[in-house]
């Protein structure tokens, strides 16, 4: 039996399903990261030496909200490409690995109060964002371009992490 293009099995997923699939992991990472980070921002983080270019705490919320929105829209665009699109599965895998590294960095830097450990996580984290962009670009150029602000911020965070480690070693 063949499936006709109008049969339910051949129909793409509804938009809202892909929107949920795109947004829920980002929200989960954000909430879990905040659960680890916020208590330390109030206790440990004020006690360590920081470079003069350390942003005020209020900057982080709007920046991460914007970055997470761009990430979610980018992965949504990848999800909306047809099943079997070359490179789609690899792009989605890389994206989810970098999301896991995002959370891992918060857990190590803030949760363990370890700038050195954070540095050991943020370098592969940044590399995985670049891999994600390269793989997204093979599937959807706009999805890839939406990730460049993320690279800029995590690059800055890497410099900040190195500086904090150096000042507190």
Image (cartoon, rainbow, N blue to C red):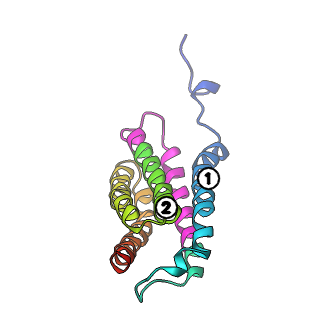
Q: Position of residue 52 (x, y in %)?
A: 42, 89
Q: Nearer the viewer, residue 138 or 5?
A: 138
Q: Is residue 75 above or below residue 86?
A: below
Q: Is residue 72 above or below residue 10?
A: below
Task: Please give the count of numbered marks on the rendered protein.
Answer: 2
Task: Name the residue beneath numbered marker 1.
Answer: 28
For residue 112, the mark is 2
- Residue 65 visible somewhere in the drawing: no
> Can you tell which quarter of the image residue 51 is in?
bottom left
- The residue at the point 49 percent across, 61 percent down is 112
Q: Secondary structure under badge 2?
A: loop
Q: Is residue 55 left or right of residue 15?
A: left
For residue 158, the mark is none
The N terminus: image quadrant: top right
- In magenta, the rendered stretch is 63-90
Q: Position of residue 86 (x, y in %)?
A: 36, 38
- Going from N to C along the chain, the mark reached first, 2 or 1, is 1
Q: Is residue 130 magenta?
A: no
* Main secondary structure found in the magenta portion: helix
Q: Nearer the viewer, residue 48 or 104?
A: 48
- Residue 90 visible somewhere in the drawing: yes
Q: CA distance from mark 2 to mark 1?
A: 20 Å
């Amino acid at each position: 039996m063949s499936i006709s293009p109008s049969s339910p099995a051949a129909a793409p997923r509804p938009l809202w399903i892909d929107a949920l699939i795109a947004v829920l992991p980002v929200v989960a990472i954000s909430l879990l990261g905040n659960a680890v980070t916020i208590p330390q921002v109030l206790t440990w983080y004020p006690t360590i030496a920081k470079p003069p270019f350390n942003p005020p705490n209020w900057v982080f919320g709007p920046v991460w909200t914007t970055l997470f929105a761009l990430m979610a829209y980018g992965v949504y665009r990848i999800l909306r490409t047809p099943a079997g699109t070359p490179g789609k599965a690899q792009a989605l895998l890389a994206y989810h690995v970098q999301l896991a590294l995002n959370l891992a960095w918060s857990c190590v830097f803030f949760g363990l109060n370890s700038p050195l450990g954070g540095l050991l996580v943020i370098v592969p984290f940044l590399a995985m964002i670049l891999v994600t962009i390269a793989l997204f670009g093979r599937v959807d150029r706009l999805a890839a371009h939406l990730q460049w602000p993320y690279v800029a911020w995590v690059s800055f965070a890497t410099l900040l992490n190195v500086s904090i480690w150096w000042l507190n070693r």
